[in-house]
Amino acid sequence: MAAARPPGRLLLEGIQNALDASAMEVSVELFPDGCVIEDDAIAGFADERLVYTVFLSDKPDEPTKRGRMGRGLKELIASMDGARVETVGTTVTFDDAGRHVARNQRTRGTRLELDRTFSAPELDEAERLLRLVVPPRGTTLKVNARPVRRPRLHLVLSPVDLETVVVRDEVERVVERDTSVSLYAPRRGEEGHLFEMGIPIGPLGTPWHVDVGQRIPLGEGRDRPPERWLLRLKTILVENLIHRYLDRRELRADWVQEVIAGGRLEARTLDAYVSAVFPRGAVLSSGSRANDRARQIGAHVVDVATMPRGVAQTLKRVLESSDAYVKRRATEFGSTPVVPDATQAAFGELVRWLARQIAGSVVRVEFFRAEPTADGLMEDATTDTAARLVRFNVLGGLRFDDPFDPTTLGVVLHELAHLDTPEHDRRFIDRLQFLAGAVARLSSEEGPRLVERFYAGVGKRDPDTVVGPIPPRFATTDDVTEVRGDATEPASGAPPADPDVPSDVS
């Protein structure tokens, strides 16, 4: 079973024993046919049985000791073709003939000579893994004669409540205990890993190396903790780092999304996440009609279809849906119907005429009065597609006295485009583009007539002056009055000319 584990993972067992023995210098030499691990710890193995008896350990039962209490060294030796353990006063040799014990004159530390054939990829991967080790301060670790540089410490979180492993009544048990969690900046070419007191466990997906200051619950291969333990650790990281150390890009990383989906974050942390990741006024998408209406009244709709289901479920705790948002804001958009004055009535006539000419639609036009909402949002106009009704806010920013003002004409075309669809989808964009082109052509062909038809009803182009009667309607091309000499007669089928309207306008 041990031989199936990656060589680098096995060799870490020898390093962690040296670190637990407070060695000041540890060296690892890798060869195609074996490996040598040596340390200078003050004491070696006080009892030779510690080298070959599974579960026998001289380490105190403390969660701050690495390893698995009497298993790691034995598994390392068992995975080799042969081994020689030279410790203080005793040498234990394992070969084809069995186990042999002899006395020696060694007075400090332990030397492990391990025999096994390694492929070049195995050696490369083993060296990469060994160089991930974060040696304790004051301890020098060399791999193939090159020192392993300690990464730069970024932050220490303490106290942190995490599960750890203890041995009680000769049984490993999982208990909760306060510890510290150290974050290191990965060295060049490294990705963020999880560490157990400096020993790498496996990739974590975080932007830092995360070193837990106590024994971690691990599976049989000792390369990954249980998923619930990992989720707890990542949740702690998000809760402690979201306010200062995680930017918008990092908050969108997979490991943070995993935490959000886990649903264990406090509401204040979720609020901070939403504020950092989404624009102000974010709501969760629901139906397409509600989404579009929410956008119209100022919301930023977040598409839940693009996020994991668990993330969407969690965000519902702090974000309302577009449907709920629209219903809530509807009470803020209270409006009062308004009887139009002469200028507004003429504006309405022009809108109806444009609807017939360029959109081929018969519409009703109404006016209303609506104050800005608490956040300053003002609706200039609305369209009820089903009722073919366009409404304009007399308190908005439209120039009723000048419908050919670019902004005002743009709003009119926008609302006429909504006669085809209430949503701002591709169909709406295509329709708006068509209407813009149609009104441009109409202006080039009948621009002067359009202007005269409008201002005949409201007087000169002066927002403070409204004179003259309101024309009953804007005529189509066929309705234009024909002028023959001094006599003025309506064209065939046209109503009689209004005597109060200039002779060239019906």
Image (cartoon, grey):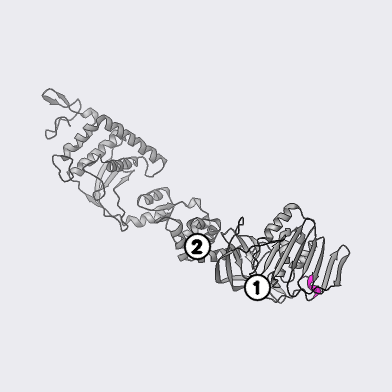
Task: Report if residue 338 is visible in the image.
Answer: yes
95 lies left or right of 327: right
State which tag comes first along the sequence, 1 or 2: 1
What segment carries the magenta color? 46-54
Q: For residue 67, what is the image quadrant?
A: bottom right
Element class at badge 1:
loop
Percent of width and height locating residue 414: 33, 42
Which residue position holds label 1?
64
Q: For residue 389, what is the image quadrant?
A: top left
Q: Which quadrant: the C terminus?
A: top left
- Residue in the picture at 42% in, 40% down: 426
**Label 1 amino acid?**
Thr
Which residue position holds label 2?
245
- On screen, residue 430 above or below 480: below
Q: Is residue 302 magenta?
A: no
Contact, mark 1 vs mark 2 (Cβ under 8 Å): no
Task: Report if residue 221 is visible in the image.
Answer: no
Q: Nearer the viewer, residue 441 or 205?
A: 205
Q: For residue 148, what is the image quadrant?
A: bottom right
